[in-house]
Image (cartoon, grey):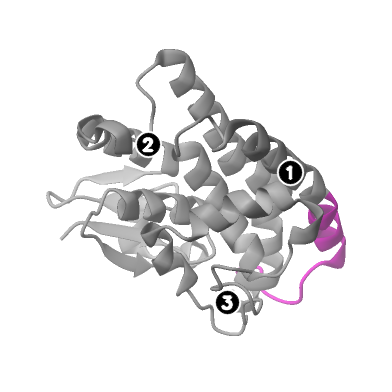
Amino acid sequence: MTTLYHHPMSAASRFVRLIIGEYDFDVDMIEERPWEKRRAFLTANPAGTLPVYVDDNMRALCGPFVIAEFMDETHGVLQRERRLLAEEPFQRAEIRRLTEWFLLKLEQDVTYPLARERVYKLQMSSEAGGGAPDSRILRAARANIRQHMKYIAWLGANRGWLAGKRMSYADLAAGGAISVLDYLGEIAWDETPAAKEWYQRLKSRPAFRSLLADRVRGVVPVSHYADLDF
């Protein structure tokens, strides 16, 4: 059975889960806490990072970019209008640029600091770095949210979808990150209505259902998290 090692609050994991949902893969999901450094997990990915995709032949693909490229080359090219990476080279480059923006820059500026302080540290032992959230890190991450949301709003208002007229990896990468932040109630949606409209369309897709069903012990999602009309 093909397997995806993930964590429900990992934006990169959510990105790959959305790809799996859009392409209708049958995949076994295993929640992983990478800070526990399980030997079996490190065997699959010595870097100890998520997500990790293991195929039926027990071959491991590590990291969201590698997994996304593999899925496009093995399945996306056959999808025609449902392909999540464009056929035209410049458009592919723009999709990759934005995918990197959301999986690296937004992750560094906002998503990972908030997820770590508010979720991961609750699950970590003290030896692994668990404990109370650091208010300085929370303030810094929250200060960065507004500019990222304005950028998403601009892209959505001017392009339809974030990278162009069709939904792509860029939307799924942003959706993976934004859904984490929305779960935690960190987004003021009334400030960026164009971003809200884009997210409502993405959130309504069948591939999003598994993300909306996620629940993390000890962290209750914001009341509108699973509401498609919020």
Instruction: Read off the magenta span.
Output: 128-143
Residue type pointed to by label 1 = His
Foreground of the two, 32 or 11? 11
Q: Residues within 10 Å of mark 3 (few under 14, many from 20)?
A: some
Q: Is residue 21 visible?
A: yes
Q: Residue at x 48, y 46 (%)?
A: 172
The vertical placement of 184 against 179, above or below, is: below
Foreground of the two, 160 or 163? 160
Residue type pointed to by label 2 = Leu
Q: Which mark is residue 84?
A: 2
Q: Is residue 66 left or right of residue 197?
A: left
Task: Tell me how many marks there are.
Answer: 3
Q: Which mark is residue 123?
A: 3
Residue furthest bottom as drawn: 218
Using the rendered view, name the quadrant where residue 112 is placed: bottom right
Q: Residue at x 37, y 58 (%)?
A: 207
Q: CA distance from mark 1 to mark 2?
A: 22 Å
Q: Is residue 131 magenta?
A: yes
Q: CA distance from mark 3 to mark 1?
A: 28 Å
Q: Earlier in the sequence, mark 3 or mark 1?
A: 3
Q: CA distance from mark 3 to mark 2?
A: 34 Å
Q: Secondary structure at mark 1?
A: helix
Q: Residue at x 35, y 60 (%)?
A: 5
Q: Position of residue 27 (x, y in %)?
A: 24, 60
Q: Which residue is mark 1?
A: 148
Using the rendered view, name the quadrant where residue 133 is placed: bottom right
The vertical placement of 117 against 221, above or below, is: above
| Viewer-nearest of discs 3 and 2 | 2
Q: Is residue 98 left or right of residue 36?
A: right
Foreground of the two, 10 or 154? 154
